[in-house]
Image: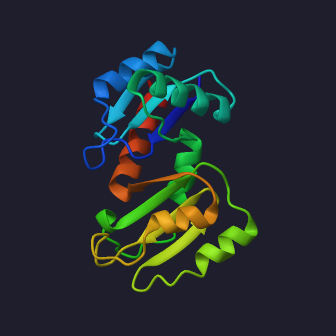
Amino acid sequence: MPVIVSMLRGVNVGGHHRIRMDDLRALYESLELRNPLTYIQSGNVVFRSEERSPGRLAARIEDAIERRFAFRPSVILRTASELRDAVARNPFAGRGVNPAKLLVMFLAGEPDREARAKALQIRTAPEEMSIGGREIYIHYPNGMGRSKLVWTAVEKLLETAATGRNWNSVTRLLEMAEELEAA
């Protein structure tokens, strides 16, 4: 049974769309998703599922969250293998980038060539941005708080839902997925 990582967009951010992680785990269990494990308070869940369609699975989770918590966040899914590939494709690997200043935006769908080109035309200096598959890697050398690059603007240009995780969270989610695979 494959291991899946789900990342909810906009959960527990700025006091909005609050979900306690034990409630989220219980919701996943009610959907017959096996061994759900949460990581930090931003809606990350690692679990096993027999569902073969990522679209159907994401919609099931979104529907259940909407029924239970009265809001509907986007749910971005990656298999353990896809997450492993995203980590391996990090264009900033080996450059000594502070992991807390590297954001990976996980996209719900792969942007078309035109949208990708528009996003890459955004002036990002001193930030650096790279798009690979369904992930965008953004290095914020001075931190995200002072940046003029707003990743929601990039998301809008790409015309697909996205959610961002810093590199520390990405690698921890991969460790959790690999531990669950091994169990």
**Depicted 144 relative to depicted 166: above or below:** below
Closer to the camera in the image, 61 or 135? 61
On screen, residue 75 versus residue 126, left or right, reads right
Tell me, what colour scheme is on the image? rainbow
Residue 166 image offset from top left, x and y in percent: 36, 57
The reply to whether residue 168 is visible in this rendering is yes
Outermost residue on the left side: it is: 15
* Quadrant in which the C terminus appears: top left
Front residue of 102 and 2: 102
Residue 135 as seen in the image, left or right of residue 11? right
- Occupied quadrant, residue 160: bottom right
Point out the image quarter for the N terminus: top right
In the image, farthest residue toward the right: 113
Please give the name of the residue rendered at 34% of the width and 76% of the height, measured from the top-left corner: 147
Q: Nearer the viewer, residue 52 or 76?
A: 76
Q: Residue furthest front?
A: 70
Where residue 106 sits in the image (x, y, percent)? 52, 53
Q: Position of residue 121 (x, y in %)?
A: 60, 82
For residue 89, say whether it is visible.
no
Q: With respect to residue 170, does 156 lie above or below?
A: below
Q: Nearer the viewer, residue 127 or 9?
A: 9
Residue 23 picture location, percent across and down: 32, 22
Total marks placed: 0
Classify 131 as above or below 5. Answer: below
User: Which residue does the image show at 47% across and 39% down from the upper left?
Assistant: 73
- Relative to residue 43, is residue 90 drawn left or right? right
Q: Residue at x 38, y 66 (%)?
A: 102
